[in-house]
Amino acid sequence: NAGVTQTPKFQVLKTGQSMTLQCAQDMNHNSMYWYRQDPGMGLRLIYYSASEGTTDKGEVPNGYNVSRLNKREFSLRLESAAPSQTSVYFCASSAQTVPMYGYTFGSGTRLTVV
Amino acid sequence: QQPVQSPQAVILREGEDAVINCSSSKALYSVHWYRQKHGEAPVFLMILLKGGEQKGHEKISASFNEKKQQSSLYLTASQLSYSGTYFCGTETMDDKIIFGKGTRLHILP
């Protein structure tokens, strides 16, 4: 099925460990996004990539890095995980920066940092 | 800044109507509405553009008042399937979509 695929679905990290969250879309979308969702806080934008080869900071970029590997893939890296990064992470994609047909979200990665 | 949604939570009986509001302190170019079921990803409902018309989707419609920098989502004759958390997302001049904290809607049979 066409859509946005995120891996892994669940992850437990120890404080200070690093990891990369993977995201791939097969809809030929230009723009991709990483959001985190915490209880009562809604969806907060971490980083986004308006098109292949570009990335930009969102609302809460500290502690994260991203790579737009190609048009399909957009990864999120935590270099030194902290308990404050415990969250559900969603990747999304859209045909344009302002999507007339909305964002398509992946199923999320639930990350716990202990 | 995040747009402000109100109310934070609503409990309705099946068949009742609801209105969810979204307001921003910044000038808006568009407003998006999404619904998220528990444990699932958000799903796009509709987009309202500056200067555009009121949009509709099944019994769910929305309006956009550019002057007041506000949007409202209207759920008419609610169904059990409408339960979930509703998010508005606002687009400002730097092309980013910023989401509100969400409104939890619970429909009772």
Image (cartoon, grey):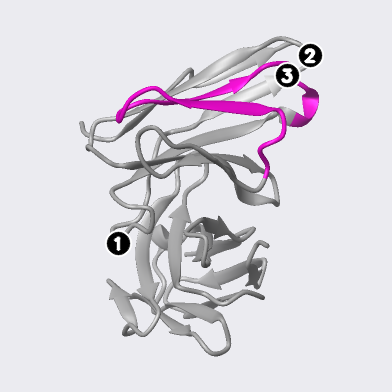
Location of the C terminus of chain A by quadrant is top right
**In this picture, is A91 found above or below B12?**
above
- Across and down, in percent, residue B104 comes to 59, 60
Q: Which residue is mark 1?
A: A100
Q: Earlier in the sequence, mark 2 or mark 1?
A: 2
Q: Which residue is mark 2?
A: A15
For the residues bearing labels 3 and 1, Cβ distance under 8 angstroms: no
Q: Earlier in the sequence, mark 3 or mark 1?
A: 3
> At 68% from the left edge and 42% from the top edge, which residue is drawn?
A60
Q: What amino acid is labelled 1 in the image?
A: Met
- Across and down, in percent, residue B84 comes to 50, 56
In 3D space, how far apart are the residues under numbered discs 3 and 1 (Cα atoms)? 35 Å
**In this picture, is A53 found above or below A102?**
above
Task: Pinpoint the chain carrying mark 3.
Answer: A
Q: Is residue A79 magenta?
A: yes
Q: Are marks 3 and 1 on the same chain?
A: yes
| Left or right position of B9 against A21 | right
Location of the N terminus of chain A by quadrant is top left
Residue at the far bottom in the pictured view: B67
Task: Pinpoint the chain carrying mark 1.
Answer: A
| Label 1 secondary element | loop
- Across and down, in percent, residue A84 comes to 78, 31
- Tag shown at residue A81: 3
For the residues bearing labels 3 and 2, Cβ distance under 8 angstroms: yes
Task: Pinpoint the chain carrying mark 2.
Answer: A
- Across and down, in percent, residue A46 comes to 60, 40
Q: Is residue B83 magenta?
A: no
